[in-house]
Image (tube, rainbow, N blue to C red):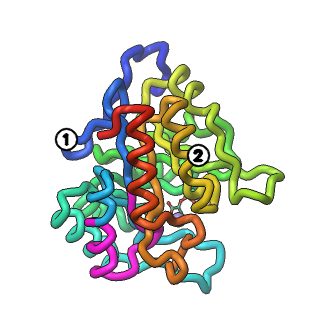
Amino acid sequence: LANRMFHPQDTIVDVNGIHIGGKKPIVVIGGPCSVESEEMIERIAYKVKEAGACMLRGGAYKPRTSPYAFQGMGTQGILAMEKAGKKTGLPIVSELMSADKLDEFIEHVDVIQIGARNMQNFDLLKAVGKTKKPILLKRGLANTIEEWIMAAEYILSEGNPNVIFCERGIRTFEPYTRNTLDLSVIPIIKEKTHLPIIIDPSHATGDWKLVESASLAAIAAGADGLIIEVHDDPENAMSDGVQSLLPEKFDALVEKGRKIAHVL
Ligand code: PEP
Ligand code: MN
């Protein structure tokens, strides 16, 4: 179903009237790694909106390496995001880790993110495939393009056509970056499938200083959008502060992006 051969025209995923894919303007999604409080997500929502983001990201259920690290605010975080999204008019993107929270996400979240660690959680893929929600499907840490496309196929085959691929870097032997951004996936995904693809330069590089160049390269390579971590106090962030951009840096990045492509 994802195959371009049987579906030559680009799929355009509609998120509350914002179109992702096709020859549409590219979308920029900004926000913190984790929702830390109601006040914080609202404050950052206004800042990313002002900088040109058309959607808000924020995790409430966090897949942390250590069980002792901050695990996210859960339902409270989702409700705080929903409120910030409504106030700013930004649709919200958040990660669903388990199908038992699916009803909560259907009710309160606009785009359901499937995280890298769950790319091959087939029961979770089937569960979100039974909804009509837009699904942001991140590439697994060590998954091939073929495996990634088949993960999308799990969602499509359950009846949900609204899949957006998200490349977030893959694990290689290189320790200078958190992951290695694989930009070649953009033309490959576009050739093999009709689905949109966006890039997450924050998790791909793991270093805020590298986020701008990775973002501009992704735009030049034809990505349909970017999802970027933004925090106004990165040193004290509950997660991923080192890769989070200050709002003013995010703003400068979006302005540079506009010189390469039409940014919504
Ligand atoms: C995230 O978006 O904060 C996240 C955990 O992403 P990934 O699944 O790509 O690591
Ligand atoms: Mn993160």
Q: Is residue 123 magenta?
A: no
What residue is shown with label 1? Answer: 17
Residue 70: % across, % down: 52, 82
* Closer-to-camera residue (70/215): 215
Q: In which quarter of the image is the C terminus?
A: top left
Ligand 1 under 8 Å from disc 1 Cβ: no
User: From the viewer's perspective, is residue 63 above or below residue 259?
Assistant: below
Query: Where on the picture, by quarter, is residue 259?
Result: top left
| Label 1 vs label 2, nearer the camera | 2
Which residue does the image show at 51% across and 25% down from the upper left?
Answer: 190
* Closer-to-camera residue (221/77): 221
Question: Is 26 on the left or on the right of 110, as rendered?
Answer: right
User: From the viewer's perspective, is residue 122 above or below residue 232?
Assistant: above
What residue is shown with label 2? Answer: 214
Residue 216, disc: none
Question: Is 169 on the left or on the right of 152, as rendered?
Answer: right
Q: What stretch is highlighted in magenta?
A: 30-46
Residue 131: % across, % down: 30, 47
Q: In which quarter of the image is the N terminus?
A: top left
Residue at the farthest right position: 173
